[in-house]
Image: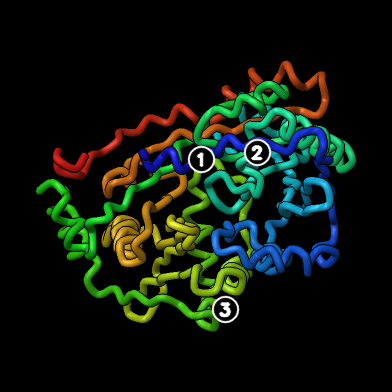
Amino acid sequence: MNFFELLKPSAGTAPDGSFSLNFTIFEDLNEIALKWSLMDSNESLNPWLSFDFQKNMVTAMPENVKVLYGCYSFGNEIKGYFPIYFYDFSLDKSFREKNPIKRILGKLIKGKILLMGQIFSTGTNYPFSEYLRDQHFQKELHHFLHSIASRYKAKAILWKDFFSVCAALEQNGYFSFKYQPAMIMAIDNHWETMHDYEQFLSSKYRIRLSRARNKMKGITWKTLNKEEIIHSQADLHRLYIGILSEATFKMSTVPVSYFSSMKEAFKEKYNITAGYLDGKLICFYSTLVNGKTLEANLTGFEEKTNLKMQLYLNMLFLMVENAIKLKVGKLNFYRTAMEIKSSVGAVGKDTMVYIKPTSKWLAPLFPILIPWFSPQNIVWKSRSPFKAIFS
């Protein structure tokens, strides 16, 4: 099977009418703490849906995000819990826009959005992925979400991220649009070491890797433990903010405590690797093991030093090496910086986002405004670093 097929939600079927399908909302995580934590014993659990993650992120949410908790059950059997994010959206604060007309209009477009999916990652992070293409399940879920959105005065419901069309959502009136592709790299099962990966590269890209390594001489790399993360998180946050300010789109900004909260939630599955030059922290990257995927989470670096020492490119190579050592099947680099990520072996995979206004009078405006403001037409050239026999 093509590894991209693994990214698609499977087409499960919800129980027939003899079973009642129920959805419930909770504002206080403590109400469901025991039941949710007991479900975390499942070895195949998506870590983004774990109770430990929800518990530790309560105090590490971005200022413009509030989280509630949903539960779905078939009859008396609880099947899963999931976060429901309420995101205070302001277009002028989310997009870095040069067009003066768009900047003026952007100040007028704001409101609360109910967001389904994981705000901190790229991918389909739902406990009910197998049922998402079942129309009965989707219809009942939409009624539940619409009632919650109305109760908390959200102007729209947004689903992220899908790697293929979800007809059930479209049939329920959701408008779809493509955003920047997720950059995903297949890790060949024959690669035992970084040297094996290098042998698959064409001579041009082997030389490029060698030059990048030479430029980072003098940098000391260290994987931080929990205490070191707490001690360094102000500097980590400063480096993260530095590159976030240049992003075309930013949904939200994580607080300083995000890094230690992630480590506390995910333990050994989450790692921050920091680069030091003459004892000073100049860059970092973070990763999360999610099943057979290594996810590249937040990064940060000093811009001037990056230009001189190719920090970002070297960190991408280090993440590839980590993925090989961990023997995962793929490395998810998330979005942005598509061209440089493709130069180490990642392939762009289109992601679909679905949105539906809660007010009927807003519905005709969405197909006009979203494509106009969306930065989906960014021009970039996909690189092919591997020898022809591999690519």
Quarter location, residue 152: top right
Residue 188: give x, y in percent of width and height: 27, 52
Q: CA distance from mark 2 to mark 3?
A: 40 Å
- In-front residue for pair 177/90: 177
Q: Of the residues tagged 3 and 1, which is closer to the observer?
A: 3
Position in image of residue 117 (x %, y %): 64, 45
Mark carried by residue 131: 2
Q: Which residue is mark 1?
A: 248
Mark nearer the N terminus (2 vs 3): 2
Q: Secondary structure at mark 3?
A: helix
Give the total number of marks visible in the rendering.
3
Please name whichever residue, 379 or 353, is drawn nearer the observer in this view of the structure.
353
The nearer-to-camera label among 2 and 3 is 2
Residue 131 x, y percent position in the rendering: 65, 38
Q: Amino acid at mark 1?
A: Thr
Mark 2 belongs to which amino acid? Tyr
Q: Would you call the spot at circle 3 few (<14 residues within 10 Å), some (14-19), or many (20 or more)?
A: some
| Label pair 1/2, CB-CB below 8 angstroms | no
In the rendered view, tell whether residue 143 sits above or below residue 368. below
